[in-house]
């Protein structure tokens, strides 16, 4: 279907892996740093994009982090969170300046 419509590009998924979020909220330094991260990413984050060429296609991403040398808290787990979204989703709708009418309640 996309080949017959060359103007349509496959959607791109943007994602961010974030390590030790709770610890950083308490004002403590993260215990890990991601290897191979972008220069603009903080050491506790890894962000990238994945092209989604068609539905039901699987994609595997590998992200590696290493423990800091001076870890003292070895009992609490290191939580990694994932945030994601479709690149440019909603931007086209907002850019046109059209708004939807208020929704009516459903009984």
Image (cartoon, rainbow, N blue to C red):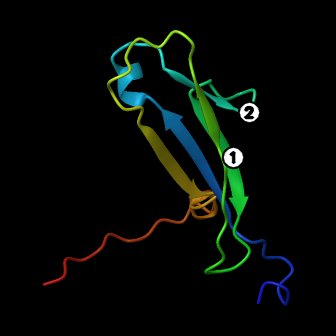
Quadrant location, the N terminus: bottom right
Quarter where residue 22 is shown: top left
Q: Label 2 belongs to which residue?
A: 38
Q: Where is residue 2 in the image (x, y as percent from the top left)?
A: 79, 84
In the displayed structure, would residue 36 be above or below residue 60? above
Q: Considering the numbered disc 1 on the image, is that residue within a helix, a strand or a loop? A: strand
Q: Tell which of 15 and 105 is nearer to you.
A: 15
Residue that sits furthest to the left in the current view: 107
Q: In screen coordinates, is 80 left or right of 4?
A: left
Q: Are marks 1 and 2 in contact (CB under 8 Å)?
A: yes
Q: Position of residue 107 (x, y in %)?
A: 12, 84
Q: Which mark is residue 67?
A: none
Q: In screen coordinates, is 105 left or right of 79?
A: left
Q: Residues within 10 Å of mark 2 (few under 14, many from 20)?
A: few
In the displayed structure, would residue 18 be above or below residue 53? above
Residue for point 69% across, 68% down: 11
Quarter where residue 13 is shown: bottom right
In the displayed structure, would residue 63 be above or below residue 25? below
Q: How many marks?
A: 2
Give the distance between the C-alpha atoms of the residues marked 1 and 2, in whole angstroms: 8 Å
Quarter where residue 51 is shown: bottom right
Q: Label 1 belongs to which residue?
A: 48
Q: Tell which of 72 and 46 is nearer to you.
A: 72
Q: Which of marks 1 and 2 is nearer the N terminus?
A: 2
Q: In screen coordinates, is 83 left or right of 21?
A: right
Q: Position of residue 27 (x, y in %)?
A: 38, 13
Q: Tell which of 89 and 76 is nearer to you.
A: 76
């Amino acid at each position: 279907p996309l080949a017959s419509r060359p103007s349509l590009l496959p959607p791109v998924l943007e994602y961010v892996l974030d390590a030790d979020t709770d610890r950083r909220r308490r004002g403590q330094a993260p215990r890990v740093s991601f290897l191979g991260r972008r220069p603009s990413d903080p050491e506790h984050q890894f962000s990238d994009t994945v092209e989604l060429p068609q539905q039901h296609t699987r994609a595997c991403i590998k992200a590696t982090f290493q423990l800091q040398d001076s870890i003292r808290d070895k009992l609490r787990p290191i939580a990694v969170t994932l945030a994601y979204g479709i690149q440019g989703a909603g931007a086209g709708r907002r850019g046109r300046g059209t708004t939807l009418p208020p929704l009516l309640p459903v009984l």
